[in-house]
């Protein structure tokens, strides 16, 4: 096995994606100071198509072109927000590592610095996430949920305009861009179950590239890996994607893994929550078991009528 002297790290072009790639680059440089890790930025469908509603696009819209660059050997490592990666990845590729997870919660950014419970009746809340809409609507049906597109900076800016009173974003992205001072409220997983993989970075490479796989394993967070593997197994069993209101959040505590999950009907009228604790020795089985139980409790009917 020959270790390459130069390793190319693939990233989307957004500010957040570049910061995430630099986070991975720094971790790698600390482990392998003798190697040259360089970031290559790539445009994806999700980045180019700024007007199409998110509901019309698949979960993999932000990763496809980066995976194609891996397959064609234009890059050696792909850095993804774990929540953007579909349940199934292309043949020949493999997710090798997850970096330490940042804040997993969803947050509110409000022009008046209001908390969620203090938003006035009829307030316009910007989010295009079926998962967020289903859960937040169950608590505040008096709010108006309005679609929104754009990167984090754009959506924060829109929260101060005339079209929105507040927007919902992922805490980790705001933290990575050092803008947490603009957060007006945090949603606990008990209120809004986070997206699968939210807050974590997934590092992908070619299945047969042993040298790169060995490099990535050196920066893998075992805790995050166990948690996200359980969540992704849940998603696979549910058959979920970006347009399906399903979510799972796993938390490892010593040898136990607690997974909180939800599924909603397409019209948001029905919503199911289920939390279970498992031994952490087989996270994929734990995620699959939770999904099967949730489906048996009525989740399967919710998904069938979409």
Image (tube, rainbow, N blue to C red):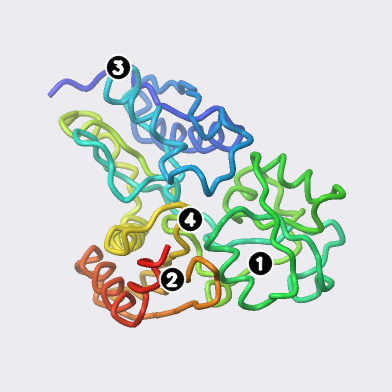
Eyeballing the image, is 10 above or below 17? above
Q: Of helix, strand and loop, which one carries label 4?
A: loop
What is the x, y in percent for residue 90?
Answer: 25, 37
Eyeballing the image, is 270 above or below 208? below
Task: State the CA–CA distance, disc 1 to disc 2.
Answer: 21 Å
Task: State the CA–CA distance, disc 3 to disc 2.
Answer: 46 Å
**N-term mark: 1 or 2:** 1
Q: Read off the residue under disc 1.
A: 186
**Can you tell which quarter of the image residue 74 is in?**
top left
Eyeballing the image, is 6 above or below 231? above
Say which of 29 and 149 sits in front. 149
Q: Read off the residue under disc 2.
A: 263
Q: Quadrant of the N terminus?
A: top left
Mark in the foreground, 4 or 2:
2
Q: Of helix, strand and loop, which one carries label 1?
A: strand
Q: Read off the residue under disc 3.
A: 5
Task: State the CA–CA distance, disc 1 to disc 4.
Answer: 14 Å
Q: Of helix, strand and loop, which one carries label 3?
A: loop
**N-term mark: 4 or 2:** 4
Q: Say left or right for 6 vs 25.
A: left
């Amino acid at each position: 096995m020959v270790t390459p002297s130069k390793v190319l790290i693939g990233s989307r072009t957004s500010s957040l994606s570049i910061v995430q790639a630099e986070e991975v680059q720094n971790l790698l440089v600390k482990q392998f100071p003798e190697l040259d890790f360089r970031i290559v930025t790539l445009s994806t469908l999700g980045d180019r198509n700024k007007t199409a509603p998110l509901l019309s696009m698949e979960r993999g819209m932000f990763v496809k072109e980066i995976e194609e660059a891996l397959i064609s050997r234009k890059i050696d490592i792909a850095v993804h927000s774990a929540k953007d990666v579909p349940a199934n990845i292309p043949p020949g590729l493999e997710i090798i590592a997850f970096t330490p997870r940042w804040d997993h919660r969803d947050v509110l950014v409000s022009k008046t610095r209001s908390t969620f419970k203090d938003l006035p009746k009829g307030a316009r809340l910007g989010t295009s996430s079926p998962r967020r809409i289903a859960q937040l609507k169950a608590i505040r049906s008096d709010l108006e949920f309005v679609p929104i597109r754009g990167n984090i900076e754009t959506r924060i800016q829109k929260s101060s305009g005339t079209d929105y009173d507040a927007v919902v974003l992922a805490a980790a992205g705001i933290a990575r861009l050092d803008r947490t001072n603009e957060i007006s409220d945090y949603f606990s997983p008990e209120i809004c179950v986070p997206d699968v993989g939210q807050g974590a970075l997934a590092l992908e490479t070619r299945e047969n590239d042993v040298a790169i796989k060995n490099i990535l394993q050196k920066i893998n967070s075992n805790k995050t890996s166990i948690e996200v593997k359980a969540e992704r197994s849940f998603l696979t069993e549910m058959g979920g994607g970006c347009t399906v209101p399903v979510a799972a959040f796993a938390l490892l505590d010593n040898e136990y893994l607690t997974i909180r999950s939800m599924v909603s009907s397409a019209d948001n009228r029905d919503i199911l929550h289920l939390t279970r604790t498992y031994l952490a020795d087989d996270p994929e089985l734990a995620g699959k078991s939770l999904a099967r139980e949730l489906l048996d409790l009525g989740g399967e009917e919710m998904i069938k009528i979409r």
